[in-house]
Image: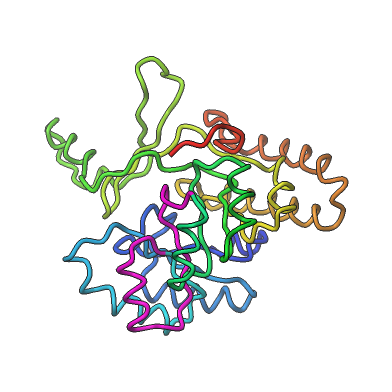
Amino acid sequence: MKKVIEAGADAINIGNERFGLRLPGNFSLDEIRQAVAYAHQHNVRVYVSVNKIFHNDDLHELPGYIKALAEANVDAVVYGDPAVLMTVRQVAPNLKLHWNAETLTTNVETINYWGRKGAVRAYLARELNMDAILEIKEQADVEIQVQVQGMTCIFHSRRDLVSNYREIQGADDREFGLKRGMSITEEKRQDLHYPIYEDHNGTHIMSAEDTCILENLDELLDAEIDSVKIESVMKNAEYNARMVSVYRRAIDAYYETPETFSDKATKLMLEIHSFHPQDRALTTGFFFKEQVY
């Protein structure tokens, strides 16, 4: 966290696996308090993910956790389940809400609906193309965040699929699935590796490629997109810090001299290729494809 702040991030997204999905690190409440204190000393905001799929037996812990986050002075809670919104209204009504329902954040009417319920920002689905993103931004009543870098989740199950499979094989390692170094492939596309791991919320399969739209970042900045996100899950601290540094310089270059942004972006892409893993392709994702829901 400290490394990405030093590299130029002006906001970080953290959380605890009991309440949030696909986190780059698992922060206890005490660590969240320490993170907020450090970040605020450096004028950086802290958003805490509370976006897991909640079942009835999860709800009794939610009010205490939300209240503790408010007391820790976090800048916003990221949610997808209305249960979180209702809990915030009851125990921490001044806590800001960012709506992130993954593949559901695809149209402006739904986004504005949650805006009327209290959300101040929406995180757009990764399956939207650039035209849809710009149209939503133009009509949205809340702030808009777009992921510009990193892998995306393509499958989630609450089942411990990897651990169960290992157990059937006779392996005695129930914690094996928590290690984030596994991948699966397709029979006809052996060159593509889909990272797979388990945490306390089940099994997650991630994309075989990383989205990277650095060279088209000016289109989002022209449209005054409020926040761009670098997905840091399953990357180490050094990699994340270097990627944040690249995007920080790209954003600053755009605002300093927009007319030379293209040349600057080309040079920064060469820098990304110098440290990005060669076995993970960089693509523009769905930004210039037909929308996929």
**Hey, which quadrant is residue 224 in on the image?**
bottom right
Residue 105 in magenta?
A: yes
Residue in the image at 72% along x and 40% along y: 215
Q: Is residue 73 left or right of residue 41?
A: left
Residue in the image at 23% along x and 48% along y: 158
Q: Is residue 284 left or right of residue 163?
A: right
Specify the farthest residue to the top. Answer: 188
* As drawn, 129 above or below 125: above
Q: Nearer the viewer, residue 259 or 214?
A: 259
**Hey, which quadrant is residue 66 in on the image?**
bottom left
Residue in the image at 45% along x and 79% along y: 95
Query: Could you say where residue 291 lies in the image, as x and y percent from the top left?
Result: 51, 37
Residue 234 in magenta?
A: no
Magenta residues, as a range?
79-106
Q: Quadrant where the C terminus lies? A: top left
Query: Could you say where residue 26 lies in the image, as x and y percent from the top left?
Result: 38, 61
Query: Could you say where residue 90 lies in the image, as x and y percent from the top left?
Result: 33, 83
Residue in the image at 25% along x and 43% along y: 176
Q: Is residue 177 left or right of residue 228?
A: left
Query: Could you say where residue 5 lies in the image, as x and y percent from the top left?
Result: 61, 64
Q: Nearer the viewer, residue 105 or 205?
A: 105
